[in-house]
Amino acid sequence: MKTNTTCPYCGTGCGITAERTSDGSFTVSGDEAHPANLGQLCAKGHALADTLNADNRLLYPEIDGKSVSWYQAIDHVARAFEETIEAHGHDSVAFYASGQLLTEDYYVINKLVKGWFGTANVDSSSRLGMASSIIGHKRAFGSDTVPGCFADLELADLVVLAGSNLAWCHPVIHQRILAEKRRRPEMFIVVIDPRSTTTSDHADLHLRIQPDGDCLLFNGLLAYLASHDKLDEEYLKQHVNGLEEALQAIGELPMEHLAERLGVDLQQLEIFYGRVAFTPRTVTLYSQGVNQSESGSDKVSAIINMHLATGRIGKPGTGPFSLAGQPNGMGEREVGGQATALAAHMDLDNPQHRDVVQRFWDSPRIASKPGLCAVNLFKAIEAGRIKAVWILGSNPVDSLPEADTIRAALQSCPHVIVSDVTTRTDTLDYATVRLPALPWGEKDGTTTNAERCISRQRALRPPMGDARADWWAVSQVACRMGFRSGFTFDSAADIFREHAALSTTGNDGNRDFDIGACASLSDQEYQDLQPFYWPWRSGKPSTQSVRFYENGHYSTADHKARLYPVSAARPGNRDLSDHYPLILNTGRIGEQWHTMTSTGYAAALHAHTDEPFVELHPHDALIHGIKNADIIEVRSPHAAILLRAVLNDRQPLGQIFSPMHWSDEFASQARVDSLIGRRTDPVSFQPAFKNQAVSIQRFDAGSHGYAMLKHKPDRNLFVDIDYWAMTPIVGGWQIEFASKQNARELDTCMAMRLTRSMQPCSMEPLTCLDHANDIRRMAVFEQDRLQLLLFTSSAPVPLSRSWSAAQFETLWNERSTRWRMLTGRPAIDLPEEDAIV
Ligand SMILES: Nc1nc2c(c(=O)[nH]1)N[C@H]1C(S)=C(S)[C@@H](COP(=O)(O)OP(=O)(O)OC[C@H]3O[C@@H](n4cnc5c(=O)[nH]c(N)nc54)[C@H](O)[C@@H]3O)O[C@H]1N2
Ligand SMILES: Nc1nc2c(c(=O)[nH]1)N[C@H]1C(S)=C(S)[C@@H](COP(=O)(O)OP(=O)(O)OC[C@H]3O[C@@H](n4cnc5c(=O)[nH]c(N)nc54)[C@H](O)[C@@H]3O)O[C@H]1N2
Ligand code: SF4
Ligand SMILES: [Mo]
């Protein structure tokens, strides 16, 4: 049987066709009818079927580590909130979620917090990705609306990718653009990113600006267009306010001066500005290199200013395009699931809006002031002002800045309720109550992708164990607290209808978000709902693609868009010092998703990167006495971590890059966010994840090694090993380690620990002390199977990991050939493919 559903990873929101095979397992392929991907999928999408077999599912509710019934768990959580609110007031409780929940989950959370708790202390990890874009949109359009759609990227003649590593983070959109470029080679792609990426490899022009040079770059562009008579005077007159103020804020920007401050070639800058000047069909797509910055909101405004002033918006192949990262970051914005929003795109500080929402909900209260945004919310927990928090679908102990303070905050908080789908995350360690949620394949509802396309995520099979939908758990707690009137939902469809009805209530076309047509869907119609773009107003047909502001009619009071004056600060990092001389930039790699809670277990996704790493320029490495594959300590004023050094000149001098993914589950000390300070954009409160002053130092290891074994070892086995990193391989797990101990000590200690769980009577170990090569070698067999391999040395072990890994699949009934495992290679004269990390 085939089921159409949606991918739960990035904001591309690819349609997926899942098919159950005769043995009960599933295969997945791209849904050819889905407008976002037209049949394509990336590696993460393809690996989804594997994640359905995860054996680390959280299946039963727990209080203080003990399994309990849902009845007990709900009662406990309801009382925790009740007592906390009674003793400390409505603002002493909070919710923290993510754009990985479904719209229906989020609608219920937001309703409970804002309508019944009467606080706006509900925020999410979307704050870490999208907050600056929301500010930019509202400043300019009066509404948080992404004007264009993916098709505009194919219709454009100039595609500007600012602070986006599209090739890795939204691969299917990138492929759509590259396919169009093959059809029309004259299409011009510009990448704006301080470092080289797979995305910049495919660009016609790569502007390697200084970190946070974006405001200056786009301000310079607006000034250039103005002085070259390339603004759309007619459009400005009819539809836009604020040109004079915007130009005034920019002031004089001579090109030579500008190029120097940005750290780019004058000629390159002229090519970029010249291209923009002469290409009406321009799209500027931007993501975290723009948003995650102390000047994130202003960067967004500077980009939108250029588009408004040239009238390049609301027309085919044009527009500023904020690319949502999470699968449902957009749905979260639509329900208003943030500390700074109300519901259905209505505003907290608008009394009329509050009235509309409160009447519609018939709620006893309505939040009237902004709640605490992500970083400040956890600061309030740390300070003891918030005493009960419910975390759903996020792993803040690894994904928020100054991550070690998040641990401390949760440790001191009396009630930490965590809803998750897995048994192990660094956040679950601090939960007083754990609630089992439904993962992809079991959950059911809707998501909105980056181009406003709403699609169904459908269940492929019944829930495992006692896992339940997040909306159900939240509604049950609400009912137990006595709020039955608002929370007697029977299904996701029930909630979606209510959400749709609210979107159209009091909305005479003055709010962009309106899906009133869905307010009367039957259960069956909801089940069959095809992907559609909002708005879908009542009585109108649904559309397959829609562009906002085609008529230049904006959602501001006078229906004119507004240029926002941006004065750009000097690019770079003012915290650099002799102690912290380098800039740490962070982000993602193609194969991993956030804190690896699901992709971390898929061997297929670890083919290229096994360990937490930091990329640095060879010259910076030389200055610091660092060689390729050394372990290095990266230090900021907040913490220090250990990462494998990868030298390449794709990093600019003075800047290093490390992915955000590794957690305590997969490595000893690699939580990058423990290094990042809590500096945020002053308006959007989005953290500056991409520009942190740090120092680096070679870690002086006395020994190195790696082990392979059939089952994932408990990470507590390695607590005293300075550096370790665990990776799934086909048929087992691989652990790399390094230590201050000497090789003999490391070897003895690892051999003892890794064999501890094996049956001594059936173990058949082979060992060898290879003096010539300085490698201690050990292989352990049980019956015909290889169970464990261990190699240690005083230097990194130069043996092929992939060959060793493949041997776990081999039948070793010939004892006489087993010694071969100790060589760690197929045959003496074959090359070793991946001996060096
Ligand atoms: N494989 C994978 N895909 C994902 C995710 C994932 O975890 N893994 N997560 C999803 C989510 S939630 C998000 S938000 C998106 C993020 O998607 P992206 O924003 O594309 O990804 P990042 O790697 O965070 O950052 C993009 C680029 O910004 C650059 N950058 C850093 N500083 C600056 C600057 O000052 N100016 C400019 N112009 N660029 C700068 C970085 O060098 C980096 O290459 O990805 C989504 N897709
Ligand atoms: N240094 C650095 N840090 C960053 C970033 C960066 O670029 N650099 N990017 C930031 C950005 S943009 C983002 S979006 C965040 C992402 O960071 P997080 O929000 O922490 O995302 P995940 O690590 O994916 O954690 C999601 C958790 O939810 C669980 N889960 C999945 N589906 C469900 C569900 O339906 N219900 C429930 N209850 N649980 C579920 C998963 O098992 C997992 O444990 O990281 C931010 N942190
Ligand atoms: S591009 Fe994004 S939505 Fe599409 S398959 Fe890949 S991860 Fe999933
Ligand atoms: Mo994100």
Image: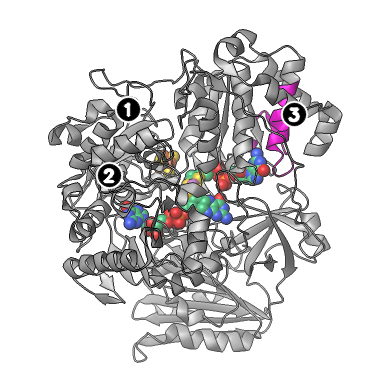
Q: Which mark is residue 104?
A: 2
> Is 690 on the left-hand or right-hand side of 146?
right
Residue 827 drawn at (x, y percent):
56, 67
Tell me which numbered mark, 3 or 2, is placed earlier along the sequence.
2
Mark 3 closeness class: few <14, some 14–19, many ≥20 residues within 10 Å = some
- Dot 1 amino acid type: Asp
- Identify the secondary structure beneath mark 2: helix
> Is 741 on the left-hand or right-hand side of 352?
right
The quarter in which the N terminus is drawn is: top left
In this picture, which residue range is highlighted in magenta? 199-223
Mark 2 closeness class: few <14, some 14–19, many ≥20 residues within 10 Å = many
| Residue nearest the viewer, comparing 313 with 144 | 144
Name the residue furthest bottom.
Answer: 761
Mark 1 vs mark 2, foreground winner is: 1
Residue 560 drawn at (x, y percent):
52, 18
| Residue nearest the viewer, comparing 606 with 641 | 641
Tell me which numbered mark, 1 or 3, is placed earlier along the sequence.
3
Q: CA distance from mark 1 to mark 3?
A: 37 Å
- What residue sits right under mark 1 in the picture? 514
